[in-house]
Image (cartoon, grey):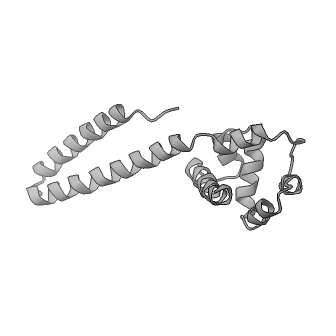
Amino acid sequence: MSFNYGREEKKWRLWKEAEEKQLRSLGVSEDTIEKLHTHDWAVFNSDRRYYRRLQDAGTYLEEFAEETAQPEVKTVEDFLDSIENQRLYQILIMVDRLTLQIVVMKIQGYSTHEIALRLNTTEKAVYRRMDRLKEKLKKFFE
């Protein structure tokens, strides 16, 4: 599902207008309201950048897994055993087990939501772990 910037900005503006109206009725100074507005706008844009990067990242590891025809991987150990490139193997053994488990589950076709539920974590944590691994792999492929 893609992030609809216009819709999200409209929702943010409506929320912010209601909040500012309530703050004014409580007697909060205009300077303070403006500072809150600026801060909240920065947070909104930060989230917007996160979702944009998330979309730009796409399914890099999924595409990589599809390109390399490997036997079915069922465990982290199977995954590590299937790595033939010694340098890549050295990078992957330094990665924590949870991240490797997420990769194995992605290879097996689980969605991010399903992975988060099975590993008792949040979807955002799964995305962040995948992003960090992707950055390490980008350095490897440069």
Give left or right: position of 126 versus 1: right
Q: How many marks?
A: 0
Which residue is depicted at the point 46% across and 44% down?
51
Query: Does residue 86 lie above or below 115 as drawn?
Result: below
Residue 22 seen in the figure = yes
Q: Position of residue 132 (x, y in %)?
A: 60, 58
Q: Position of residue 115 (x, y in %)?
A: 69, 45
Give left or right: position of 76 versus 120: right
Quadrant housing residue 133 = bottom right
Query: Does residue 32 lie above or below 70 as drawn?
Result: below
Which residue is depicted at the point 70% across and 40% down?
62
Give left or right: position of 36 versus 9: left
Which residue is depicted at the point 34% across and 48% down?
44
Residue 29 seen in the figure = no
Residue lying at the far front of the rendered structure = 142
Foreground residue, 101 or 29? 101
Q: Position of residue 59 (x, y in %)?
A: 63, 40
Query: Does residue 93 lie above or below 128 as drawn?
Result: below
Which residue is depicted at the point 25% across and 37% down?
14
Image quadrant for the C terminus?
Answer: bottom right
Foreground residue, 20 or 50? 50
Q: Position of residue 1 (x, y in %)?
A: 53, 32
Foreground residue, 125 or 133? 133
